Image (cartoon, grey):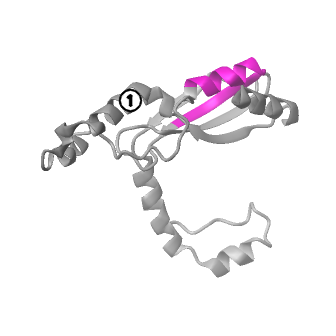
Amino acid sequence: MKRSRVIAEFQKKLKPDGAVFLHHSNLGEYINRVNVQSRLLETRLLKVPKLLGVLKGLGILEEDNWHWRARSMTAKKMAMFAEQHHLQCISQELITWGTKFVLLDCLSTLGPSDSKWSRQNRVIRNYKFMREAERLSYCRVYIDTDVVASALTLNPIDYRPPEC
């Protein structure tokens, strides 16, 4: 299995207390919903005016755009692959990515099972990820690029970015 081989490479390359951060699909967690939605979108039922909008508004349907995510991958599978290769999921944040209700993606942090980071996996289900990202994008307006450029020559401990 290709994904498992990738995780095996991380296990070989990581230093004893190293970590790897991965952004991967979690669509497999919703495979039944995806299949039902696909079948529903093929029916004539949605030809009824405004029905599609109402179903999307209620969260019964999402946009029919799963952003080319792997339907077979989940956060749980990533944790399983890591364990098979003597790695451990330290944290996993399940996030929306262009969806309202489906936690389409996962941000996983892995490390060696015996590293200083070793602990029980912390799984966060973040339904507000896209809203948070949008809000943070407004912070860039407040960051002075000259300050950032000059800070690159400073000791990182001395530099404190401006608050937004």
Asked if residue 91 lies in the magenta stretch, the reply is yes
In the foreground, 137 or 80: 80
In the foreground, 26 or 71: 71
Residue 118 in sight: no
Badge 1: few (under 14), some or many (20 or more) residues near its Cα, within 10 Å? Answer: few
Residue 67 in sight: yes
Q: Is residue 44 above or below residue 7?
A: below
Q: Quadrant of residue 36?
A: top left
The spot of residue 71 in percent (x, y) is: 52, 32
Q: Say what amino acid the circle numbered 1 marks.
A: Asn
Q: Which residue is mark 1?
A: 35
Q: Quadrant of the N terminus?
A: top right
Furthest residue toward bottom: 146
The spot of residue 163 in percent (x, y) is: 52, 66
Q: Quadrant of residue 9?
A: top right
User: Which range of residues does the magenta coloring cover?
Assistant: 76-93
Q: Quadrant of residue 162?
A: bottom right
Q: Is residue 44 above or below residue 135?
A: above
The spot of residue 131 in percent (x, y) is: 40, 53
Point 33% across, 42% down: residue: 62
